[in-house]
Amino acid sequence: MLKNLYAPHEWQIIEETFDAKHHEMSESIFSIGNGHMGQRANFEETYSGQSLQGTYVAGIYYPDKTKVGWWKNGYPEYFAKVLNAPNWTGIAVKVSGEVLDLATASVSSFKRILDMKQGLLKREFTATLPNGKTVSVNACRFISMDRDEAAVISYAITANSDVELEVSPYVDAQVRNKDSNYDELFWTPVSSHFSDDSDAGVVVAQTKKTAFGVATGMIAHVEKRASTVQFKPENSKTEWNVASTYRLQLKQGETVTIYKYVAVLSTLNHKPESLQSATLVYLRELRTAGYDDLLKDHVTAWHNKWQESDVIIEGDIEAQQGIRYNIFQLNQTYSGKDARFNIGPKGFTGEKYGGSTYWDTEAFCFPFYLSTASQEVAKNLLLYRYKQLGKAIENAEKLGFTAGAALFPMVTMNGEECHNEWEITFEEIHRNGAIAFAIYDYVRYTNDKQYLADYGLEVLVGISRFWKQRITFSKAKNKFVMLGVTGPNEYENNINNNWYTSTLAVWTLRYTTETYKFLKEMHPAENKALVQKLSIDEAELKDWDDIIRNMYLPEDKDLGIFLQQEGYMDKEQILVSELPASQRPINQHWSWDRILRSCFIKQADVVQGLYCLEDQFDVDTIRRNFEFYEQRTVHESSLSPCIHSVVASKIKQLDKAYELYLRTARLDLDDYNNEAREGLHITSMSGAWLAIVKGFAGMRVKSDTLYFDPIIPKQWEAFSFRIKFRGYVILVRVTKLQTSIQNISDKDITIKFREGFLQIPPRQTVNELNR
């Protein structure tokens, strides 16, 4: 059942009532971040109700010891987790001796707004405490998009009668992960300190095992309207926290505002011995800059982000709100500034999946950053994997592979595999193909073929060597086969000849061979060095070619479809439309055994392959496979609807494409999967962008040329977006009648529009009828 908790708005997410039942979901929905750190929308004041406290710092993780009932050779020793880090949001409030707590107070009005245009989290409420005192609060919070290590809170309290007020901004490092395997506290205190003038407080904590240091500092400033009094706090500290307590009298109607400036520094960017002092210096800079200037710079940074990546939908406010929410979360999760960071499935919004890197980055997120940010951002995502190639080779060695074969991890922080479900750790090896395809996608889009010589071929060879050793020759079939795998559809485990996995393996071997030959011809010196470094020879290339020509790829010729895997048609063929609503989602109602035996598909599998490699198939083949598998796909992975939407647009099934777009774009806002309380589906949010730009607009790169084949949902009057391509900036607007393509660049560009070519001069627009 969809929740529909948030009012439709083009630029805002609005919650107009406080309901404790949905509080954890709203903590996720209203999360904010800046690529360096992030924060769930926990209340500043005390809240004793059900809550998932969450503060996260990019790159800071802990190897939580694996907890399994049995052990298998090759299992990782730990599951890496981005930690719940020291809490900087806290402002404890007492009103005439009573703690302000919305779990115990009577809340007469409440409004929370996520202003996506400016990157602000706002909240206002009026509450009557058990002692009968009533106060109104108006709060605003932002994590600076201009300064990576800064956050600011403005918290204004208005008294509805004369009260004694005690306000205590604090930092608390004694925090826990709810998902700790052994209920372990992951942090140890290092120091807590106030500056000599008792103005700024800093807590330094260190992670166990990994020894990451994080300094979380605050400096507060209190203003009372129409008062020139300088309020001085009473400071207190323990080994875990610092707090500054202000006591003052408020008369009826008076307002006091607490400005809390926050600095979060880590040993990723600072020396451990200078962490505390550097934090104090940074806090002084923030306080000197002041709230208004910090806010102005933050809003300007968001303005620039939106200039690059906004998608405008006219005539459908829910669709508009959905895409902007997705883009907002993507931009505040990953900035691309630091190649050490990547994108976790929940970003900075929850603990599930540990905040680690999955194949989601390459398969789903990569095209968004490739088209909306500088080329270096996408390149950094590829370099993240290149720098972990050695670990990928070690991961493969642990499973018995040799000679430089590389298996990139399903889940990782530092390149080591840290996932311990056997059917995923050992069998969901299609992730290797996604990484190879991202290299191809990057080079195809940017034309940066030097990347292949500098980094790409090494990764491709490692992956190809893994495929060569993972594939078996079947005498019975007289073909090469791929046994014991799990495809993207995790509702089937330990299967043989998954079409998607085998097809990507063949494609990778072919692309690696083509890359080798290209470098041999065009970059002979670099190719020679790589041949020596990697020990590539013609015999290896011949082995790869044998697999390419003789791989078994299951299909049903009568139906004209590729088989999900060998034996798929042995399953009872039931359609999703025949499933009672009371049994959906099946992963919350059926036993795992029943799911595995069913024909139901969790997410795009064959359709995922058709999406990636569509140039290899005619439209009729794509249509037959889509229509067959869409009827059997329950979309219980957040990664599924977007791919089906893109392919539906390709075959001109516009109503289905729109339905699946809306499901993708509003997955968390409407809580389709009843799990938003655990955190947002960050990596699938790029799917909403894919559904519009690659789906409805039909954007591709064909023969080194940008290509469009647009359609428009009947619910929309128009949609428009801006992309970057090889130094050009292109603005596309699609209406029901025509498509306008504007060249916002200083040189001519040639675009392919359907079957024809358009040459667009600098700063000019070309209009084409949508026939």
Image (spheres, grey):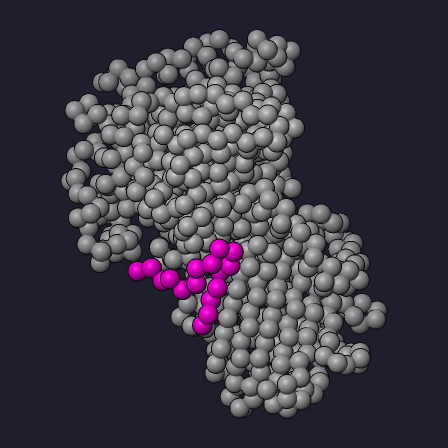
Quadrant into which the N terminus falls: bottom left
Q: Is residue 426 visible?
A: no
Residue occupying image coordinates x 53% and y 27%: 445
Instruction: Count numbered badges in the picture.
Output: 0
- On screen, residue 710 versus residue 156, left or right, reads left
- x, y percent for residue 477: 24, 18
- Of residues 98 and 610, the one drawn nearer to the viewer in this rendering: 610
* Residue 614 is one of the magenta-drawn residues: no
Relative vertical location of residue 399 with respect to residue 549 in this rendering, above or below: below
Vertical arrangement, residue 111 with respect to residue 346, above or below: below
In this view, the residue in front, 665 or 313, is: 313
Q: Which quarter of the image is occupied by the C terminus?
A: top left
Quarter occupied by residue 122:
bottom right
Magenta-colored segment: predominant secondary structure: loop
Q: Residue at x 51, y 88 (%)?
A: 130
Residue 569 at x, y = what percent?
18, 33
Is 2 magenta? The answer is yes
| Image spot of residue 388 (x, y percent) | 57, 34
Q: Which residues are magenta?
A: 1-17
* 254 relative to 505, above or below: below
Can residue 621 be seen from the camera position used here? yes
- Compared across the picture, whether 268 is left or right of 440 comes to right
Up-down relation of residue 615 to residue 320 (above or below) = above
